[in-house]
Image (tube, rainbow, N blue to C red):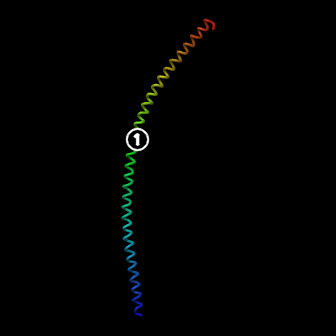
């Protein structure tokens, strides 16, 4: 029967040793996971910052191009406004001319009876 207590003692020692090894490994892996997660977060932050810079540069170029196009459109619109005003003036002048000619034709018809 002396072997039974030794046998139980060996089992308890083995269980405690296995538990200690498992706990140590778990703590080590947990610490390793934290470090990897922190590293991943840093890498992700760097990637996001890089993407943000690239998008910012692309948008800056697009804004510059759009400003150039807008200036062209504003210049063209100014030209069109000026041409439109010239056409309105010409139209007004032609209307007056048509009215004068209509009056003269009516006077002519009245005098000559047509």
Whether 3 is drawn above or below 42: the answer is below
Q: Quadrant of the C terminus?
A: top right
Residue 70 placement: quadrant: top left
Specify whether 53 is left or right of 97: left
Q: Farthest residue to the bottom: give it.
A: 1
Residue in the image at 38% along x and 76% along y: 21
Q: Quadrant of the N terminus?
A: bottom left
Residue in the image at 38% along x and 65% along y: 34
Residue 100 placement: quadrant: top right
Q: Farthest residue to the top: give it.
A: 112
Residue in the image at 40% along x and 44% along y: 59
* Total count of labels: 1
In the image, residue 75 lies at what x, y percent?
A: 42, 31
Are there few (<14), some (14-19), or many (20+) residues within 10 Å of tag 1? few
Q: Farthest residue to the right: give it.
A: 113
Whether 80 is drawn above or below 66: the answer is above
Q: Which residue is mark 1?
A: 63
Whether 78 is drawn above or below 40: the answer is above
In the image, residue 86 lies at what x, y percent?
A: 47, 22
Whether 110 is drawn above or below 82: the answer is above
**Which SS class for mark 1?**
helix
Specify whether 101 is left or right of 17: right
In the image, residue 9 lies at what x, y percent?
A: 39, 86
In the image, residue 106 lies at what x, y percent?
A: 59, 11
Residue in the image at 55% along x and 15% along y: 99
């Amino acid at each position: 029967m002396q072997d039974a207590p030794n046998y139980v003692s060996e089992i308890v020692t083995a269980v405690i040793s296995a538990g200690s090894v498992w706990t140590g490994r778990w703590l080590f892996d947990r610490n390793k996971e934290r470090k990897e997660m922190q590293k991943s977060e840093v890498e992700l932050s760097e990637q996001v910052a890089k993407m943000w810079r690239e998008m910012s540069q692309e948008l800056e170029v697009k804004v510059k191009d759009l400003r150039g196009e807008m200036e062209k459109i504003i210049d063209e619109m100014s030209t069109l406004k000026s041409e439109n005003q010239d056409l309105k003036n010409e139209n007004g002048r032609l209307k007056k001319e048509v009215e004068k000619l209509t009056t003269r034709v009516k006077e002519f018809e009245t005098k000559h009876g047509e």
